[in-house]
Amino acid sequence: MIDIQLLRADIGAVAKRLSTRGYTLDVARLQALEEKRRQIQTATEQLQVAAQRARQARSPGQGEEGRSAGGRVEAPGRPSSGRS
């Protein structure tokens, strides 16, 4: 089995070593697939961040201290006026 970290770090050396054993590594295709994987991973992470923000926005009472139910920041020691 080929170590994925080694493959990503030094694809040329892996291709050369495989060729000594009678295998041909399609380096261009592997690099294209790796680029696609990175794009998908980035998009997935962005969606996860957006989903987390959406969850936080839907639960106004659970978040930063000092925020009233309306999302306003209240001054310490001063009760909310009740106005919107």
Image (tube, helix red, strand yellow):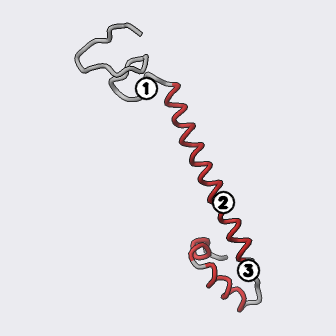
Secondary structure of the residue carrying tag 1 is loop
Kind of residue at disc 1: Gln
Most extreme residue toward the top, as rendered?
82
Judged from the image, the secondary structure of the residue bearing numbered disc 3 is loop
Who's the residue at 42% across and 10% down the image? 84
**First along the sequence among labels 1 and 3:** 3
* Quarter of image, res 33: bottom right
Q: Residue furthest left?
A: 77
- In the image, taking residue 20 as reference, residue 63 lies left or right, namely left
Question: Which residue in the structure is indicated by mark 1?
Answer: 62
Q: Bin the neighbour count of mark 3 within 10 Å (Cα to Cα): few under 14, some 14-19, many 20 and up.
A: some
Real-space CA distance between mark 2 and mark 3, rounded to the nearest whole angstrom: 18 Å
Foreground mark, 2 or 1, reads 2
Q: Which mark is residue 30?
A: none
The three-letter code of the residue at mark 2 reads: Arg
The answer to which image quadrant residue 1 occupies is bottom right
Q: Measuring from the top left, give residue 70's x and y in whole percent.
A: 43, 17
Could you say where residue 25 lies in the image, as x and y percent from the top left? Answer: 73, 80
The residue pinned by badge 2 equals 37
Give, as a three-letter code, the residue at label 3: Leu
Front in this rendered view, residue 59 or 73: 73
Relative to 8, say whether 83 is above or below: above
Q: Name the residue located 64 percent from the left edge and 82 percent from the top edge.
A: 14
CA separation in Å, label 2 and label 1: 35 Å
Earlier in the chain: of badge 2 and badge 1, it is 2
Q: Which residue is mark 3?
A: 25
Relative vertical location of residue 61 with respect to residue 83 in this rendering, above or below: below
Q: Position of residue 81 (x, y in %)?
A: 32, 8
